[in-house]
Amino acid sequence: MRTHQIVLLPGDGIGPEIISVAKELLEIVSVKFNFELKFVEKKIGGSAIDATGNPLPEDTLQTCRESDAILFAAIGDPRFDILPREKRPETGLLSLREGLKLFANIRPVKIIPSLIESSTLKREVIEKVDLIVVRELTGGIYFGKPKGRVKTEIEERAFNTMTYSNKEIEQIARVAFELSNKRRNKLCSVDKANVLDVSQLWRESVDKVSKDYPNIEVNHLYVDNAAMQLIKDPSQFDVILTGNLFGDILSDEAAMITGSIGMLPSASLSKNGPGLFEPVHGSAPDIAGLDKANPLAMVLSAAMMLKIGLKEVKAAEALEKVVDSVLGKGFSTSDIASKESIEVGCKAMGKELVKELNAI
Ligand code: NAD
């Protein structure tokens, strides 16, 4: 029997509530599709600070390195906002991404028909949206050196460096081209090549990789235009490829097209090691422990883990299907509820999902 080692990282806030829903579904779906999942749970973020003083204990990182995939919920706890940056929960996640060399962040944005009214955009603009943002995650301006602050007698100056090598660009471009190959064969690369040298290299490197994918239609957009096009006509996009800073902004913009942060999964991938699969949202401290969290982004992250990380495609599709059917029957948590929906809490949503999955 195929066996996969999974590290579960519940983290903080609503994390434990939503990950337990995903775990129960994973256990059922693995039995249905004849494979075994071996779970080990580890601490990260605020819960790890409470237990060990460190937001990413070495034992957590090492266990993640030895796994086949990592399912992560969320970190963040206002109790720790007074700590210096390196000791905060968020540093645990950044260190994990760095430690696992997770250079490719993948965020699918797909409209769920029953939730179309949750968006602030018009139905006719968004109803066909089905896109993926591929963001470079370990380079660019967030990591570039030199960086820092310099004080002189007359002023204080701060600076960061946006830097990419052709190798880094080609590596992330290949991820995007491969994804595009399995989709609608359209790739839009986003840069600021009219102003930035680093973007000119970005464009040249993407064009170089595109020669290996002659079936994929490539276009380049400047980031300001891409931001406009995402609001004006988001269904024109299939795969959007971009660097760390532009990707950070555009992926949040793209996420809001759906109108519901509690619905969006993501994957962060390395070259050869295990991938990290996580909802886009944070630990939602305002609703933690109140049984109000929407577990669906977590469940869809588990589906991404099955599909991309473990190649258990049928099991992944089964999870996606149960999410659709539960929403189709009108069940929703308060963040996505409309007048017509049957509002339920996190646990009850989990029960409905289990019922649907058992019926497949
Ligand atoms: P957030 O995503 O936690 O919450 C934003 C809003 O969305 C809140 O009103 C929250 O209640 C709601 N929300 C989020 N997820 C939801 C869900 N599944 N169901 C229902 N409602 C949901 O962002 P924030 O408030 O800016 O940050 C809170 C903490 O999370 C901070 O400590 C921040 O650093 C951390 N954070 C972590 C991650 C991560 O773990 N990847 C990402 C973003 C923020």
Image: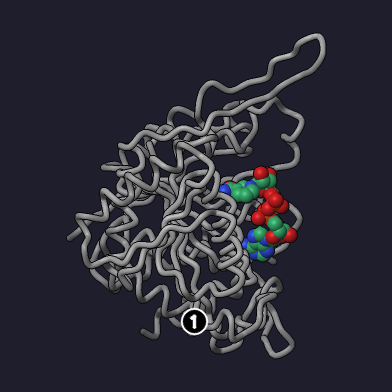
- Report the residue at 31% width, 62% height from top: 179
Q: In front here: 144 or 232?
A: 232
- Report the residue at 54% width, 83% height from top: 127
Q: Is residue 96 left or right of residue 306?
A: right
Q: Quadrant of the C terminus?
A: bottom left
- Report the residue at 48% width, 36% height from top: 140
**Furthest residue to the top?**
153
Q: Which residue is mark 1?
A: 128
Q: How far from the left and from the top, in percent, is residue 271?
A: 29, 42
Q: Quadrant of the N terminus?
A: bottom left
Q: Is residue 309 left or right of residue 354?
A: left
Looking at the rendering, the quadrant in which ligand 1 lies is bottom right
Q: In front here: 152 or 81?
A: 152
Q: Is residue 286 above or below residue 316?
A: above
Q: In front here: 89 or 1?
A: 89
Badge 1 density bin: few <14, some 14–19, many ≥20, Cα 10 Å: some
**Furthest residue to the front?**
194
Query: Residue type at mark 1?
Result: Lys
**Secondary structure found at label 1:** loop
Q: How far from the left and from the top, in percent, is residue 318?
A: 36, 76
| Residue 289 seen in the figure | no
- Report the residue at 26% width, 55% height from top: 210
Q: In front here: 263 or 210?
A: 210
Q: Quadrant of residue 250?
A: bottom right
